[in-house]
Image (cartoon, helix red, strand yellow):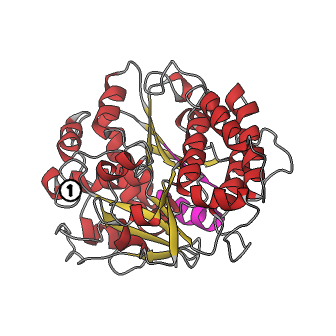
Amino acid sequence: MTASGTNLMTAGSPGTGGQQPRQLLPRLLPADGRPAGLPAHLATHGPLPYRGRPGLLIADVRQAGLTGRGGAAFPVHRKLAAVAAAAGRPVVVANGAESEPLSAKDKTLLYYSPHLVLDGLQLAAEAVGARRAVLYLHEDLPLHGWLSELLFERKSTGLDHADVDLVLAPPRFLSGQETAVVNVLNGGPALPTFTPPRTFERGVGGSPTLVQNIETLAHLALIARYGAAWFRGLGTAAEPGSMLASIRQADGSPVVREAAIGTPLRDLLGLGDHVQAVLVGGYHGSWLPAGQARQLSLSNATLRPAGAAVGAGILAALPAGCCGLAETARVARYLALESAGQCGPCLNGLPRIATALAELAGTRPGGSVINDLERWAGLAGGRGACHHPDGTVRFVRSALRAFAAEIRCHQRGSCTAATSQPFLPVPAGPAAETDWSRPR
């Protein structure tokens, strides 16, 4: 079990240690299932492979085809190059503030393989010419104590070239959004800010800033050691490598699993008749009917034509006995409460959408509710100060498609659900639709 109580699963053959690259899985996670301290980490992967000057690692990352594992899948070499080319002394941020309630991959990685993340943070700092680095994550006292000890140990042994600060993120859904991260590190609330200037131009303290998800940094540390060709030994030609997937199985149990990109969803979720739909990408993702999901894989090449995306690797198998409309309505209300409230789509659109979904999840909803949802979704999408309204609209629209049959049942005054027990986790929040993005 991880520190957060999530099961850990890996597959494949472990390496033999001492810089012998693992050709199969696990790559990111320790093969013995135990948290790796510094001696075990060095015995497995060898010393930290600094390049000696900025810029040299970027070509290897480009050849590897590494994309961000935080959700956007942006080419990592382009972010590195942009920060390295900007004027001023850069700052590098390891973003571990996974605010998505279904995600546990970053916390799992920090608990089991913290030195891969910290190595990647140092290598990214060298690549862009930074002397300051930040590890940014939500409050977890046992994990913080563990990481503080590791950072002290690394500094005492002279392993780290860049100074690393450990900074806590406010408990908000938007805390991990890139501009919100910068806002917090500059002493402000965890609110997304309007761009430009872009973060790579002027971010923390007015300096060029690289904000990179911690799983991405762990992959960076492996590429620096074993090379681009090794990294491409898993995955597909267009989407190489492996990734951590946060999975909620149909029995409600959470599991974090490392999988090659391109792995069939049916192999990750066990999509039998007991599953009615799959949520791909979390609460800013998309619902897919189980029959459709059985034909797809953990890759954008297959998911995007279906209206979904890999994102941060979040998958949830909704059991047949649950009401997909009720689940969607609960999450939509949570997302409305978690908005920054800085623009019309968040302040007005998301609460109206959540209210309409709650009506739809009841029996005999009003005849105009579907049209209202479509109209408000059209008004909210693409017009926000950040992408929160876009993600919420995507989630809601996918539910209207995936649960069309259930909608017809509700319109006739019935519901097919066998239980009213909630399935998807929704954190406790305020009792009213208020701005819930500021730190407590």
Q: Is residue 199 left or right of residue 241?
A: right
Relative to 147, does residue 127 appear above or below in the rendering?
Answer: above
| Observer-nearest of 164 and 366 | 366
| Of the pair 66 and 149, the residue shown nearer to us | 66
Question: What residue sits 16% from the left and 69% below the top?
Answer: 20
Classify residue 75 by image quadrant.
top left
Residue shown at 72%/49% (left/top)?
357
In the figure, is residue 197 to the left or right of 385?
left
Q: Residue 105 in the image: state x and y as whole percent.
A: 48, 62
Q: What residue is pinned by disc 1? A: 231
| Residue 333 placement, left or right of 276 | right
Q: Residue at x 33, y 49 (%)?
A: 300
Q: Is residue 428 magenta?
A: no
Residue 253 at x, y percent in the picture: 56, 77
Q: Is residue 78 left or right of residue 214?
A: left
Quadrant housing residue 79: top left
- Residue at (40% x, 52% y) in the render: 310
Camera sees residue 29:
no
